[in-house]
Image (cartoon, rainbow, N blue to C red):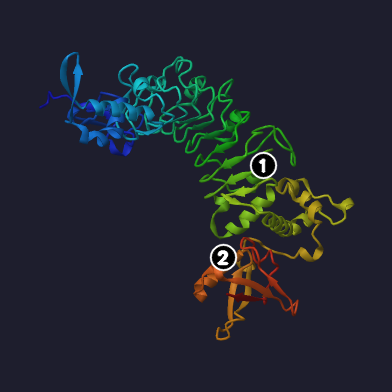
Amino acid sequence: MKNRPWLGVEWDNPERGKHDGRHEGTVYFTCRHPTGGSFIRPNKVNFGVDFLTALKHRYVLGDEAAEVGKGHTVTVGNKPVETVGFDSIIKQQSQLSKLQDVSLRSCAVNCAGDRGGIAAACPNIRNLDLSKNLLSLWDDVTDIADQLRHLEVLNLSENKLRFPPGAASPAGTFSALKVLVLSRTGITWAEVLRCAAGWPVLEELYLAANDIAILERPTDVLQTVKLLDLSSNQSIDENQLFLIAYLPRLEQLILSDVGLSSLHFPDTEIGCKTSMFTSLQYLVVNDNQISQWSFINELDKLESLQALSCLRNPLTAGSRADSTRQFIIARVAQLQVLNKCQILPEERRGAELDYRKAFGGEWRKAGGHQDPDQNRPSAEFRAAHPRYQSLCLRYGAPEDGELKTQQPFLLKNQLLTLKIKCPHQLDQKVIEKQLPESMTVQKVKGMLSRLLRVPASDLLLSYESPKMPGREIELESDQQSLQFYSVENGDCLLVRW
């Protein structure tokens, strides 16, 4: 039993292992993780199959099982010959040659197989998913891709790949490739740049969870990339981002879960646009450590930014989410979509007015004044609120009556005590509720729907104020807050359905 062979295995998930390839002081193999290795018997291992075997098993065998064993008679010369499965083979070949979208995820593919076999059997594949297989060499990938001249989308995620030190792929192998997924493959940034010379028309590149550190600026490569996903690479910081800041066509950058906490474009001053990321339209920074408004202020320097996703950061967490959304909108002038929700013109106007009002007292203390000749807010205030001056030009400087002392983020200072009446339901008693002034009309309807047991979509809201007797103001937009409509303590919400 002791002479039976063992195999050393490094698991993709290190929690499945027991050691680093060392046993009783002897190093049998090495692992990237101290608990990633195990010894197992050869008969427990699946060494995988070639590409065509996996393809036929998934796309042909199930459909053709009924054909197996059926015989047909053909004449060869003057002799009748019975063929078994001949029509089935022709049908199989026809099926494979028509395939354009192929998924072989988790099919244990380990190599291309016989030279030329893929090109002969299925030359028209355009979208290929080879994720979570047993491919271990980039050369095996190029052997497959070299036979698929129409290949546009290739997913190789969750294959632990090794890349050659020299030229990464023959010229023309990936001549049509537009989308490449290399997440969880172990690729390094140097290997990305070396391989990228063979991706002349690539538009989308996914590199999530590879422990990548960007150590070199792309030169003459990745120049066609429009989307770059660097999520879950914890080694990336803002200085490394500057190395990819001049990719000319980069429109979407995904930086979720990279530990990012700060951002500063050093090439420009407050109120100016940076020369970096000039084509960037969509930025994703979810699940990071962003806690300072200075990060959001810097985003206003991006010339083309239109959409931002900033979920699950300290800055956006907790009960102040509604106010935070308003302040992000107010601080980034050209933003059109925030956290996948469109910013309508009326929401932007309300957000900018609320922002202007919320920091009016601070502006005044810092040297701000309604008289333009005396309006000289400190450099410190202008750095903290780069857009405040432009908002004053648009909407006018805040009047003294607006500059009451307020603490925007303390819930007790935002609660409104309101009466709620249902004019068409005479048997319904008047209710008194305390609601945050930042609460949207949509959320008010949700609360009333549960309270009155009426579908929210059927509810029509308005309010009346003792300050304006005889006048009723409709709450028309579900996205706006009570504060936007100037609802105050003691006002009465009118609910109809």
Q: Is residue 393 above or below residue 136?
A: below
The residue at 31%/30% (across/down) is 55
The residue at 22%/30% (across/down) is 45
Q: CA distance from mark 1 to mark 2?
A: 31 Å
Nearest to the observer: residue 200 or residue 351: 200
Q: Quadrant of residue 485?
A: bottom right
Badge 2: few (under 14), some or many (20 or more) residues near its Cα, within 10 Å? some
Quadrant location of the N terminus?
top left
Percent of width and height locating residue 13: 33, 37
Q: Residue furthest left?
A: 1
Q: Quadrant of residue 157?
A: top left
Q: Is residue 474 above or below residue 25?
A: below
Say left or right for 32 vs 404: left
The residue labelled by disc 2 is: 443
The residue labelled by disc 1 is: 298
- Element assignment for label 1: helix
Nearest to the observer: residue 202 or residue 332: 202
Q: Amino acid at mark 2?
A: Lys
- Element assignment for label 2: helix
Q: Is residue 405 above or below residue 230?
A: below
Q: Residue furthest front?
A: 78
The residue at 69%/52% (across/down) is 330
